[in-house]
Image: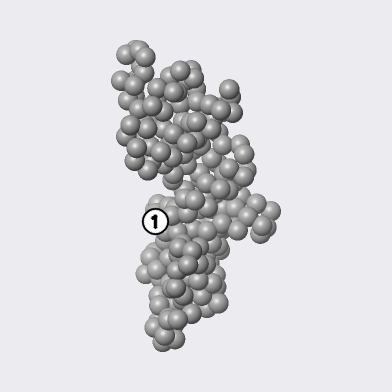
Amino acid sequence: MYTPDHYKMTDSDEILDFIKKNSFAILVSQNEGKLIATHIPILIKEDEGEKGFLYGHVAKANRQLENPDKEVLAIFPGPHKYISSSWYESNQSVPTWNYLSVHVYGRLIVLPDVEDRINAVKSVVEYFEDEGSNYSVDDLKTNYFEAMLRGIVAFKIEITEIEGKKKISQNHPAERQQRVIDSLEKIGDEDSTAIVEKMKQNLKKND
C-alpha cells in the first residue's frame, strides 16, 4: 500500500482498535497465478504468536483456499469520503479522498478439525451480536449445525506485516483542515462523522 510517511498509522493500539472496529475484511490470495478475493469477517487475536493471528472461515465451495500461495493479504477498509476543492480557501487545488485502511499480510493455514470450524462460527457470532442478544449457536439443532459446518472451511493467518494508512488532510494547514471538517459535518453521514472525529483528534494533538 502506497503510504507517505505523514499518512502512516504508527500507533499499534490505534491499528488494533481499527481492525477490531472494521472486521468485515477482504481476503486476497493468489491461487495458481490467479488473484482471488473474498469479502468476509476476519477476527484478530493479537496475543497469539509473535505478531498475532487472524481467524476466519469461507464456504467450502469457495475456491480461494484451493492451493493458495503461502502469503495472503487481508484488507480492512474503513471510513472514506470525497474532499471537494470547493471547500478550500483557494480554487488553486485539486479534489482528493480522505480514508483509513489497514493491510495485514501473513501466511495462511487451513484448519481441518471440526472443532476449528465450530470455534470459527461461534467467535464471529459472539463478536458481532449485539450485547443482550438472545441468539446463540448452541441453540441450533445438532443435525442442522453439523450440516452447516460441513459446508465451510476454517483458517488462520500468521501475521507477518501490518500497514496502516490514515489520510485525513493532515498535510494541509490547520485552517484548511477546519474547513474540511466544517463541510463534512454538514454532510453528517456515518463516514463523514468518522473522518471528522479522526481529523479533530489530529488537530487537537498538534495544537
Question: Can residue 101 be seen by looking at this rendering?
Answer: yes
- SS class of the residue under badge 1? strand
Question: Can residue 154 be seen by looking at this rendering?
Answer: no
Q: Is residue 201 left or right of residue 192?
A: right
Q: Report which quarter residue 130 is drawn in.
A: bottom left
| Nearest the eye: 104 or 193 | 193
User: In the figure, 104 relative to 41: above or below?
Assistant: above
The residue that disc 1 covers is: 39
| Nearest the eye: 183 or 128 | 183
How many residues crowd around disc 1 within 10 Å: few (fewer than 14), some, or many (20 or more)? few
Residue 179 place in picture, x, y as percent = 40, 22
Residue 141 place in picture, x, y as percent = 42, 85
Residue 52 place in picture, x, y as percent = 63, 55
Q: Report which quarter residue 145 is drawn in.
A: bottom left
Residue 27 place in picture, x, y as percent = 45, 54
Rendered residue at 65%/52% (across/down): 51
Rendered residue at 62%/43% (across/down): 12
- Considering every residue shown, the one lying at the far front of the view is 132
Q: Is residue 88 left or right of residue 6?
A: left
User: In the figure, 83 relative to 69: above or below?
Assistant: above
- Considering every residue shown, the one lying at the far right of the view is 50
In which quadrant will I find the C terminus? Answer: top right
Rendered residue at 32%/25% (across/down): 84
User: In the figure, 82 relative to 68: above or below?
Assistant: above
User: In the figure, 81 relative to 123: above or below?
Assistant: above
Rendered residue at 35%/27% (across/down): 183
| Nearest the eye: 33 or 77 | 77
Q: Report which quarter residue 13 is drawn in.
A: top right
Q: Amino acid at mark 1?
A: His
